[in-house]
């Protein structure tokens, strides 16, 4: 079966679909506010006239490219293109401010490829049991997973856990704004028709990160003498194999976390991204 699958993937149109999907996904993912969901929604009509394998390959390439594309704006502008790239912005933008933006982008790309290869290998081995497990998930299991995700954010969010818990409660409150999904009654809309759609995650993230970055740059420019700003020297962006080999433990554990937490329905990619970042940060502190 694996040989048949590899033979099907070697078709020229499948390779073209993969390249087009990845490039399109990177472009869309780098634009804050769009993300992989929007990218797939835009390209689904294109796949109606395509054979099944190239169509699925195109959508997979778009999704994977968009996930990495979110790191571009997160590193260079401190504005996450996707919710999961908010963890990348923490240290990635700090490297860009030191002139190491190219190096940070290369590391993000190589780490994404490593995690993708690991998850694909796990999927090949565990696809059948995972599919049967996902079909058994009901409302009780989904509710337990949501509580697990919130607990993970509090425990691994870094800093003071009380502050993390307060932010989680604030996020829960923001999430219940809008129409009730069961009864359809408005909740905390204050008689505003626009609030019935709720507070969407992507616009909220763009507002929090983008507007704060704009104000910070504005204040930095005002505080500088006659508007002059300290522009860092652009450093070489080359990443050697030995550099990635030193990160092998972080890459392995991050791949494990991203794969097995991502398997759980309803969790998404944001929670494992912050879990991996917290693990890497704690491991680095332990070696100091």
Image (cartoon, helix red, strand yellow):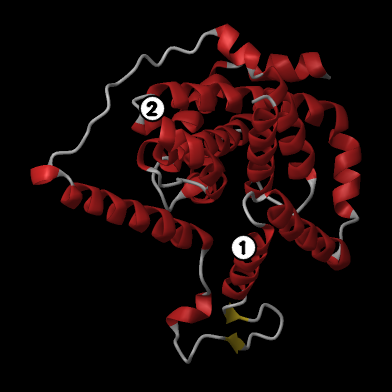
- Residue 18, given in percent of the width and then of the height, sits at 54, 26
Q: Mark 1 Cα within 10 Å, few/some/many (few <14, many 20+)? A: few
Farthest residue to the bottom: give it. 191
Q: Mark 2 Cα within 10 Å, few/some/many (few <14, many 20+)? A: many
Instruction: Assign a secondary structure to mark 1.
Output: helix
Residue sitting at x 87%, y 53%: 135
Q: Is residue 196 left or right of residue 5?
A: left
- Residue 218, given in percent of the width and then of the height, sits at 23, 53
Judge whether residue 66 can be spotted in this image.
no
> Nearest the camera: 38 or 151?
151
Residue sitting at x 42%, y 37%: 93
Q: Which residue is mark 1?
A: 163
Q: Nearer the viewer, mark 1 or mark 2?
A: 1
Farthest residue to the front: give it. 288
Q: Earlier in the sequence, mark 1 or mark 2?
A: 2
Q: Is residue 183 left or right of residue 143?
A: left
Tell me, yes or no, whether the two marked residues, 1 and 2, touch with CB atoms within 8 Å: no
Quarter of the view holding residue 287 = top right
Quarter of the view holding residue 99 = top left
Q: Which residue is mark 2?
A: 101
Instruction: Assign a secondary structure to mark 2.
Output: helix
Q: CA distance from mark 1 to mark 2?
A: 30 Å
- Residue 88, given in percent of the width and then of the height, sits at 52, 38
């Amino acid at each position: 079966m694996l040989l048949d699958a590899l033979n099907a993937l070697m078709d020229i149109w499948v390779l073209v679909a993969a390249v087009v999907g990845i490039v399109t996904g990177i472009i869309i993912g780098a634009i804050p506010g769009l993300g992989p969901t929007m990218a797939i929604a835009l390209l689904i009509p294109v796949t109606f006239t395509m054979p099944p394998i190239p169509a699925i390959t195109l959508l997979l390439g778009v999704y994977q490219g968009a996930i990495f594309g979110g790191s571009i704006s997160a590193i260079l502008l401190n504005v996450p293109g996707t919710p999961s790239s908010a963890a990348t912005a923490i240290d990635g933008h700090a490297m860009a401010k030191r002139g190491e933006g190219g190096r940070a982008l290369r590391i993000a790309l190589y780490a994404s490829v490593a995690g993708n290869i690991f998850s694909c290998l796990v999927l090949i081995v565990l696809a059948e049991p995972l599919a049967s497990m996902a079909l058994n998930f009901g409302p009780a299991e989904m509710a337990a997973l949501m509580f697990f995700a919130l607990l993970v954010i509090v425990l691994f969010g870094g800093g003071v856990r009380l502050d993390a818990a307060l932010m989680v409660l604030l996020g829960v409150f923001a999430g219940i704004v809008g129409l009730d999904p069961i009864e359809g009654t408005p909740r905390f809309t204050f008689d505003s028709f626009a609030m019935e759609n709720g507070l969407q995650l992507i616009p909220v993230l763009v507002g929090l990160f983008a507007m704060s970055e704009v104000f910070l740059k504005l204040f930095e420019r005002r505080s500088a003498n006659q508007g002059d700003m300290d522009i860092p020297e652009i450093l070489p962006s080359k990443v050697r194999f030995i550099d990635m080999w030193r990160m092998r433990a972080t890459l392995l554990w991050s791949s494990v976390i991203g794969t097995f937490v991502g398997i759980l329905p309803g969790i998404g990619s944001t929670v494992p991204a912050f879990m991996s970042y917290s693990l890497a940060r704690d491991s680095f502190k332990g070696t100091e």
